[in-house]
Amino acid sequence: MMEYDYLLSLALILLSTKLFGLVTKKVKLPQVVGALLAGLILGPACLGILKETEFIKQVSEIGVIVLMFCAGLETDIKELKKTGKSSFLIALLGVIVPLAAGWGVAAIFNKENDLPTSLMLQNIFIGIVLTATSVSITVETLKEMGRLSSKSGNAILGAALIDDILGIIALTVVTSCADKSVNIGIVMLKIVLFFVFAIAVAVGFNFLFNKWTGRSKKDLRRYVIIGFVFCLLMSYCAEKFFGVADITGAFVAGLALSNGPRATYLTNRFETLSYMLLSPVFFASIGLKVVIPKMSASIILFAVILLVVAVLTKIIGCGLGAKICGFKNKDCLRIGIGMISRGEVALIVASKGEAVGLMNEKYFGPIVIMVVVTTIITPILLKFVYKSKDTDKDSKGELQVDKFTKGTAFEEHEQRLINENQ
């Protein structure tokens, strides 16, 4: 007999994420906080009503892919180019500072070695876990506030994507020391080839898609389908052939379509798909992953220190990178806070390390706590630092206008995001 429990799970997730989202909205917090709390409360960590199944896992993966595809669609490419060099420096310091601090904290607590790998590698790996950034939480929060296309928003997007690449390199270096089957040279080559592939395909698809859609003045559903196919194929190729995160491929796919005449139409359609099903499942699934094991007093102390270090190192590292690049103090703080969330990325990295003998299982609990708290506080802090409704001023003192304030269509889209996202 066929199992239909997944239907009940979906119903509970959609209802609970919306109810909790409305509650957090009432207290002037981003609704994504409510969705995260819904998964945490209904999941194994609290009530145990829901658990992560393979179906929920796969739907949530599509959810984050669509979320990043929409982020690409809504990104101002010109502004992203302007912040390109800045994003690299922000990402670089946002990796180096947490890695060094995480290694230092682990070195203080991790004295007994009961794993086949050296203590040095194990401690470095804890630092690598702290380098992870889950940009999906920040993206959803900035979209909700209509600030995704701001100067600081573009810097966060660019830095988070570069952070992902740097994290892969750091993880590969350490795992190659523990697992001789991993070849760092091949991994680096694949990353370079991915960017060559992505740029060539994005430019080619942009030309063909705009030429094809330009034949008609109507917004046709076939445009949405072809756009989604392109998004999925880019995500697949990124993971399958190049070892780069699928969300990076999805973001590139969105960028390829962002400057076309159908960008607003595509965004509207994918936003509907996202908020009706995919995004709630994805954000709830983060909470469903959380299982907090029993911990000793010393491990709890380690968890508290690790959490503080995780928050401060991203703010300091990324904020310092932004300051060097000439960002104002308020934008430096915004960028640093936007990079705090570790989300599901840190959990995946930690699981990988545990599997290859780079992390003792007793440290998984502190990492879970760090992931949960950083994921929840990031949108809260972002709401606080973006509370000013003033747009950033350029060097001439004139007000800059974000992408979504240019033209009636963009105004309507922004207003819909703010007013109907409830």
Image: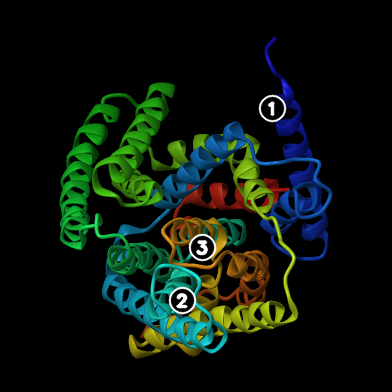
Sequence-first disc among 2 and 1: 1
Q: Which residue is mark 2?
A: 399
Give whichever of 115, 218 is nearer the camera. Answer: 115
Residue at 24% in and 42% down: 241
Give whichever of 219, 232 is nearer the camera. Answer: 232
Residue at 36% in and 38% down: 231
Instruction: State the separation of the CA atoms marked 2 and 1.
Output: 49 Å
Instruction: State the separation of the CA atoms marked 1 and 3.
Output: 27 Å
What's the amino acid at mark 1?
Tyr
Give whichever of 234, 77 is nearer the camera. Answer: 234
Question: Is 312 placed left or right of 149 in the picture?
Answer: right
Question: Is 395 placed left or right of 204 in the picture?
Answer: right
Q: Report x, y in % for residue 330.
A: 53, 85
Question: Is 201 placed left or right of 42 in the picture?
Answer: left
Give whichever of 323, 177 is nearer the camera. Answer: 177
Q: Within the image, what quadrant is residue 54 found in?
A: top right
Q: Report x, y in % for residue 299.
A: 67, 77
In this rendering, the answer to whether 348 lies above or below 304 is above
In this rendering, the answer to whether 139 lies above or below 62 is below
Q: Which residue is mark 1?
A: 6
Sequence-first disc among 3 and 2: 3
Query: Which structural element holds mark 1?
Result: helix
Q: Which mark is residue 346?
A: 3
Instruction: State the separation of the CA atoms marked 3 and 2.
Output: 38 Å
